[in-house]
Amino acid sequence: MRVLVSTLPAFGHVYPVMPTAEALRAAGHEVVVATGGTPADRLSAAGWRVERVDVSIEGAVGRVMRSQPELARLAPPERWRVAAAMFGDVLACDVDRLLGLVVESVRPDVVLYEELAMGAAVAAARAHVPAVRHGVGPWSPAPMEAACAEQLTRLGRSDGDPTFPAGPEVFGRLHLDVWPPALGVPGAQLPLPSTPLRPQSWSEQDQPVPGWLTQPRERPVVYLTLGTVAAGEVGVLRTVLEGLRGLGVEVLAAVGPALDVAELGPLEPGVHVERFVPAARVFPLVDVVVHHGGSGTLLGAAAEALPQLALPQRAHDQFPNAVALAAQGCGLGLRPEELSAEAVHDAVHRLLTDPSHRAAARELAAQIAAMPAPESVVDVLGALTG
């Protein structure tokens, strides 16, 4: 079986799918990964067959905001409209156009696509190849699913093919659902059949962790990240670092490739700043995670039974993710208007000292461990290809 794996070119989109890709390759199937940017370079260097599909998530944000400036003023519950415009329209058109050429050359038996690389579903349907959607986070709001289905149908029928799938069928045959039931999405309903799949963190084997992190230490470690697709967050990072003062912790701050570290100002002893760290290998070595509410970071930390503080900033999933963590008990959340050094200090102190958060984190980790492993997907995809 030849499987074409399609993801948007950002680590938070690529890495959640790679455990499934590894399981397929280990079972003897041919796997081709279609993505772009730095993730494509790293995967290629690690020995994966990669077909470049270079689209720009940041560029899509700019294109949407220029054409629909009113979206910038939406309240968090309505920010799915920005995501629908980005992923279901602008990026879907780009991915469909570029991936269509890859589908023609690779001739896959099935297309496995990361759920926000929606144009892959259109390219697969055009070629009459079964498509499977790989979740990376919680289910999208029903209005977003409906809006994206309408946009994808319109894109697929733009060449005059009236038989192109309409409505939810455009997403493919199956959704691989990585969201643990304990985190709940009240009222949500997936538009296509689904099967559970254990979320797993992933990183290339040759990516080292900072040496000090593996040494014996007396103080707990707080891992701070706002994701690798973030801009203009230096103020948030400064506020968090100020809030972590006086807690008696070591801090590992992963700030991404674009930030000027000098903008963080003087750093306290015990604050270690890195551009990038392999999160999958960092999670087992830290005690608390402070992050932006991104689904990949949340699930990776949850699988390691880590208490979490979520600081949602912009993306539509970050705000409900923060609420879900607090409701389950393993984490806390601070909305942008609540963010201050004092609030961060108090929240992280509670996560470090209140045993209820650690106990809830262990319960969530046990539920994740009981979900079907990526190896379970192999036979599922094989059945779809006949």
Image (cartoon, rainbow, N blue to C red):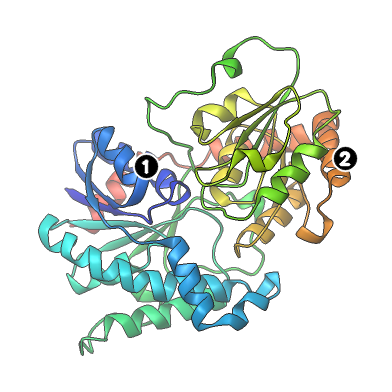
Identify the secondary structure beneath mark 2. Answer: helix
- Residue 178 spot, x, y in % from top left: 50, 50
Q: Nearer the viewer, residue 316 or 230?
A: 230
- Residue 341 spot, x, y in % from top left: 84, 44
Look at the image and tell me in which quarter the C terminus lies: bottom left
Q: Amino acid at mark 2?
A: Asp
10 vs 100, left or right, is right
Q: Residue at point 36% right, 71% down?
A: 92
Q: How many marks?
A: 2
Residue extending farthest top: 216
Camera-side mark, 1 or 2: 2
Please say whether residue 142 is visible from this viewpoint: no
> Counting residues from the N terminus, which is met first, the one under dot 1 or under dot 2?
1
Q: Residue at point 48% right, 80% down?
A: 147
- Residue 296 spot, x, y in % from top left: 53, 46
- Residue 381 spot, x, y in % from top left: 27, 52
Q: Which mark is residue 43?
A: none
Q: Nearer the viewer, residue 346 or 196?
A: 346
Q: Nearer the viewer, residue 139 or 309?
A: 309
83 shown above or below 158: above
Identify the secondary structure beneath mark 1. Answer: helix
341 vs 261, left or right, is right
Label 2 belongs to which residue? Answer: 346
Q: Residue at point 61% right, 45% down?
A: 298
Q: Residue at point 88% right, 40% down?
A: 346
Label 1 belongs to which residue? Answer: 18
169 vs 189, left or right, is left
Is label 1 in contact with label 2 (beta carbons under 8 Å)? no
Q: Quadrant of residue 112?
A: bottom left
Q: Quadrant of residue 21?
A: top left
Q: Amino acid at mark 1?
A: Met
Number of other residues with Cα within 10 Å of mark 1, as a class: few under 14, some 14 to 19, many 20 or more: many
